[in-house]
Image (cartoon, rainbow, N blue to C red):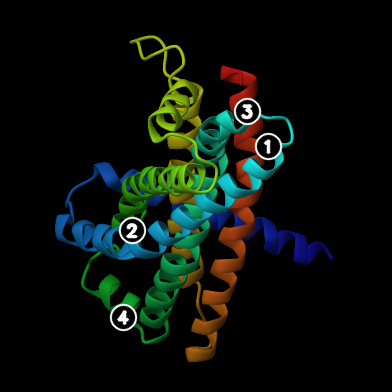
Amino acid sequence: MNAAAKKRVLRVQEYFGLAWKALRFIFARPFYATDLVQQMDAIGVQSLGIVLLTGFFTGMVLALQSAVQLQTFGATMYIGRLVSASMIRELGPVLAGLMVAGRVGSGIAAQLGSMKVTEQIDALNTLGTDPIKKLVTPRVLASLIMLPVLTIINNLVGILGGMLIANLMFGLPMGFYWRTVWEQIAADGFTLTYIPNDFIQGLLKPFVFGGIISITSCYYGLGTTGGTEGVGLSTTRTVVATSITILVMDYFLTQLLLSVVGA
C-alpha cells in the first residue's frame, strides 16, 4: 500500500516536472520553429474538419432543444442568447478539447511511444539534443496556440447552426438572432478595463485544455514501455486521462471564474 502511494506521488512529480521543463524551454534557445509550424498544422489545421462538424451540429441540437422548451413560455426570441452563452462558455471549449484530445492526443502519444520503444529518444540524447525541448515543447506551444483558435471557430459555427434552426424552423429573423447574440456576449461593450465574462471563459478554458492535452499526451508517450503493445496502452491511457481531466478542470475553472469575475 505504501509502495503504491509512493509510486503515484512519483508519477505526479514526473508529470509536473515534464510540464515545467516543457514550458521553460519555450523561452530557451535553440527555437525549433519548423517543428512548431508542423505541430500547429497537425494539431490545428488537420483538426479543423472534426471541430467544424462537431460545433455546427451541436449548435443546431442546442437551438432545437432550447426552442422547444422556450416555446412553452413564448420566449423563442431568446434562442440566440441561450445558444451563444452555452457555446462560448461551456460547450465550445469542452467539445473542442475532447475532440482534439481524441484525435491529436492519441496521435502524440503514439508518435512519442513509437520513438521510445524504437530507441529514437535515446538516440537524441546521444546526439546531445534534449528530447523534451525537441519533441515536447513544440507540441505544447502549438496546443496552447491552436486550441483557443479551434474553440473560437467551434463557437462561431455552433452559433451559425443555431441560427439556421431558429430561422428555418421557428421563423426567428436572422438580424434579430444576431442582435440577441451580441447582447449576450458584449452587453456592456468592450473597454480597456472591462472584457465580457463570456470572452474570459471562452478563451481561458481552451488555453488550459491545450496544455493538459499536450503535456498528458507527451507524458504517456515518453513513458511507453513494452513494445508495440505498450504504444497502444499509452494511447488508450492518454485519451482517457485527458478526457477526464478536461471535464474535471472545466468544473473547477467555471467555479473559479464565477467567483472572480461573476456570472
Label 1 amino acid?
Gln
Give the mark toward the camera: 3 or 4: 3
Mark with earlier residue (3, 1)? 1
Which residue in the structure is indicated by mark 4?
A: 120
Which residue in the structure is indicated by mark 2?
A: 139
- For the residue pair 60 and 190, the one nearer the viewer reads as 60
The residues bearing labels 3 and 2 have C-alpha atoms spaced at a distance of 27 Å
Identify the secondary structure beneath mark 3.
helix
Label 2 amino acid?
Arg
Q: Residue at position x 52%, y 83% from top?
A: 232
The residues bearing labels 4 and 2 have C-alpha atoms spaced at a distance of 17 Å
Mark with earlier residue (1, 2)? 1
Which residue in the structure is indicated by mark 1?
A: 71
Residue extending furthest toward the front:
171
Instruction: Please identify the quarter of the rendering in which residue 234 is found.
Output: bottom right
Give the mark toward the camera: 4 or 2: 2
